[in-house]
Image: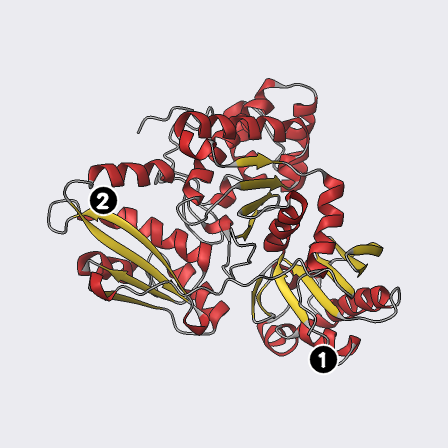
Amino acid sequence: MKLKVNAKLDPQFAPLSLVCREMREATKDDGQDLVIAIQRNKGYTVTYKTRVYKDGTGHDEENFDFVERMTKALLWVAGGYKVVIAGSETIGAKIKEAFSYGGSRDFDVKFMERVYETKFEVESVALCDAPEDKSAAAPIGRHLDGCRIGFDAGGSDRKVSAVVNGESVYSEEVVWFPKTNSDPEYHYQGILEAMKTAASKMPRVDAIGVSSAGVYVDNRIMVASLFLKVSDEDFDKKVKNMYLDVAKEIGENIPIEVANDGDVTALAGAMDLDDNAVLGVAMGTSEAGGYVDPDGNITGWLNELAFVPVDACKNAMVDEWSGDYGCGVKYFSQDGVIKLAPFAGIELDENLSPAEKLKVVQKLMAEGDQRAADIYDTIGAYFGYAIAFYTEFYDIKHVLIMGRVTSGEGGQILLSRAQEVLDKEFPELAKKIQLHIPDENSRRVGQSVAAASLPEIN
């Protein structure tokens, strides 16, 4: 595989965007059509139509490798508990084996079962029986009328705003430690106190919007790192409905809407740009994503880009949590910086925390150290190819990048190299997609106003 823009510190990098292109090219005259469908709650379905080598032509392993990566990617982009492979029983059987208890994708199966509270399954059907798309996209947000609370739950601070007719009349940030507290009462009281404070700054409360890291289904908390130390028993009893319970304390029948913070960031960007088809990517402790579609809707997808593979190289670094290789978390987060440091000739003290290691590289970058610049250059190349891969699933006009990895001069190098990849390797995308780093102030204020705008007042 020849790249037009190399990942300077990672000669093994094999972008999945090019794998997709090569598969299409290799099978255009003599391939077979295939559909991968992912189904989730209420029958919502996302399909991916592709082409692979014909069964029995000696390419079974290549077919499986390709379809397994695409199934994995689609599962974490959209979320779901049922995979349907339409068009090949041979591939379907292998995917079923991988996505099963004890299979290579055992982690993904168990995670999705927890999110959707339903047994995971894989089914093979004929191409003519492939499921159709069924969308949950809804015109969420941009409601600026009335008196609203916007709450943003971060891992190190919580932010709340009182928003009256689209203007933030009060905003506060409070340091808290949700990830180290095992008592859900700590979280409950912190959220309640924030909302009561915002409520006290307005004549009434018409609606509550919440932006929070994690996975939410029907405003219920299914998985969230904020409650890392809370026992499973307490999570089920006291955490799942926490935002709904707090809203009841603020007032009966107040509409509340809870959305993943990545989606709210993308919504804030869409509101700031006054445009749609926005993919937001935050590069911090992990990689977080959010998306506003071309109609200005939030899709209800997971957008968990941390676990979406971007590199087909089987020797790529493995994520400790999911046990999988080549996934975004090791490319677009502080882990990505730390991974590349030794290849750049930078030794990092093993006793430092990941955040402290990142600061060492950022300090070197600020001092003009070429080794640090090479790290950001490499991440930029990764990202340009990843954007092209993300377009397999998302219709994108704008990409917003943010998070502590993108701060300072390093972020500009990253963005510049990503743009070069689009220009040289994917000129058709370069004409369509604009890359942005929002300024910190507009992002922080915009996030809480965007969160407040989530619910519609009945």
Which circle's residue, 1 or 2, is located before the other in the chain? 2
Compared to residue 115, the image places residue 432 above or below, namely: above
Q: Where's residue 38, x and y in %?
A: 37, 62
Identify the coloring: secondary structure
Asked whether the viewer can see residue 5, the reply is yes
The image quarter containing residue 244 is bottom right
Q: Quadrant of residue 404?
A: top right
Q: Position of residue 116 (x, y in %)?
A: 47, 70
- Rounded to the nearest angstrom, the CA distance separating label 1 from label 2 is 54 Å
User: In the rendered view, does 155 fall on the left or right side of 41?
Assistant: right
Q: Please give the residue where the numbered disc 2 appears in the rendered image.
A: 62
Q: Which mark is residue 229?
A: none
Nearer mark to the viewer, of 1 and 2 = 1
Q: Report crowding for label 2: few under 14, some 14 to 19, many 20 or more residues within 10 A (C-alpha).
A: few
Q: Looking at this view, is 321 or 247 the one in front?
A: 247
Q: Amino acid at mark 2?
A: Glu
Label 1: element kind: loop
Q: Is residue 380 above or below residue 98?
A: above
Q: Amino acid at mark 1?
A: Asn
Residue 234 sits above or below residue 128 on the image: below
Farthest-out residue, bottom? 252
Q: As rendered, which of 369 and 217 lies closer to the eye?
A: 217
Residue 88, compared with residue 457, is above or below; it is: above
Nearer-the-camera pick, 255 or 63: 255
Give the residue pinned by disc 1: 253
Residue at disc 2, secondary structure: helix
Task: Answer yes or no: is residue 326 visible.
Answer: no
Q: Quadrant of the C terminus?
A: bottom right
Write down the quadrant of residue 10 in the picture: top left
At 74% across and 78% down in the image, what residue appears?
A: 248
Measured as percent of width and height from the top left, residue 302 is found at: 50, 58
